[in-house]
Image: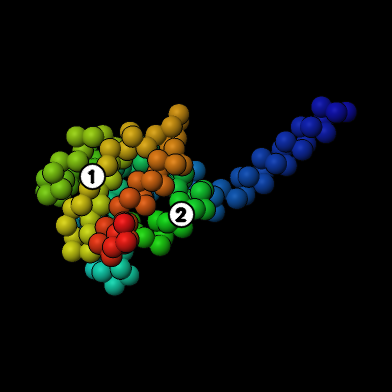
Amino acid sequence: MKKILTLLISFGILAGIQAQTGSVKTSTEIKLYHPEENASQGIREAVTKAVAEKKHVLIQAGGNWCSWCIEFNRFCKMDPQIDSVLDADFVIYHLNYSKENLNKDVFAKYGYPQRFGFPVFIILDEKGNRLHTQNSGYLEAGKSYSREKVLDFLLSWNSRALDPSSYINQ
């Protein structure tokens, strides 16, 4: 009897999960990167938005094929403090690198950051100038990322960190 009851409960759970699959996306279904997009235009729009919001641009370069790229996005969204810092301090743009679109000109413009692997992060100021390129390997911990290292990276490259008035009394 226990086996039948367990089987029925399992079947019910699976049926419920199947009914929800239209609204729940797995990590393989997440499409952060869009190979068909004009990356130069997308970055210009991100810079325009950053100017209006007094933020920097954080370009996360990679592709939908990159498990570490998807993991970084998941990791940041799941941590309320990191998610808040990203929202408050950066306009985020996902720069595609894939066989469908290598975005060679854009990667050349930013000094070939793909040399660090993926994801790689590029910080732009409010004028679209590259301030920093970050190898994501330095932010990793185990099979994910280090909360402390990611926060330190983000707080070290936000607009307040680079504002000279932040250091008047130091």
Where residue 129 appears, as percent x and y from the top left, is: 16, 57
Question: Which corner quadrant of the image does residue 91 belong to?
Answer: bottom left
User: Could you say where residue 156 lies in the image, as x and y percent from the top left?
Assistant: 33, 50
| Residue at horizontal 38 percent and vertical 46 percent from the top | 152
Q: What residue is rendered at 46% in x and 45% in y?
A: 74
Can the viewer see residue 12?
yes
Quadrant in which the C terminus is drawn = bottom left
Rounded to the nearest angstrom, the CA distance separating label 1 from label 2 is 20 Å
Label 2 neighbour load within 10 Å: few <14, some 14-19, many 20+: some
Looking at the rendering, in which quadrant would you find the N terminus? top right
Above or below residue 22? Residue 119 is above
- On screen, residue 89 versus residue 12, left or right, reads left
SS of the residue at dot 1? Answer: strand
Q: Position of residue 155 (x, y in %)?
A: 37, 52
How crowded pointer 1 is (Cα within 10 Å; few <14, some 14-19, many 20+) is rated as some
In the rendering, which numbered label is found on residue 54? none
Residue 138, located in which quarter of the rendered image? top left
User: Disc 2 marks which residue?
Assistant: 83
Relative vertical location of residue 112 with respect to residue 41 in this rendering, above or below: above
* Residue 4 to residue 48: above or below: above
Query: Which amino acid does the dot numbered 2 rest on?
Result: Asp
Horizontal relation, residue 64 to residue 142: left or right: left
125 or 19, nearer to the observer: 125
Vertical side of 118 occupied by 49: above or below: below
Q: Where on the picture, by quarter, is residue 114?
A: top left
* Residue indicated by mark 1: 133
* Visible residue check, residue 27: no
The tag earlier along the polypeptide, 1 or 2, is 2
User: What amino acid does circle 1 point to?
Assistant: Thr
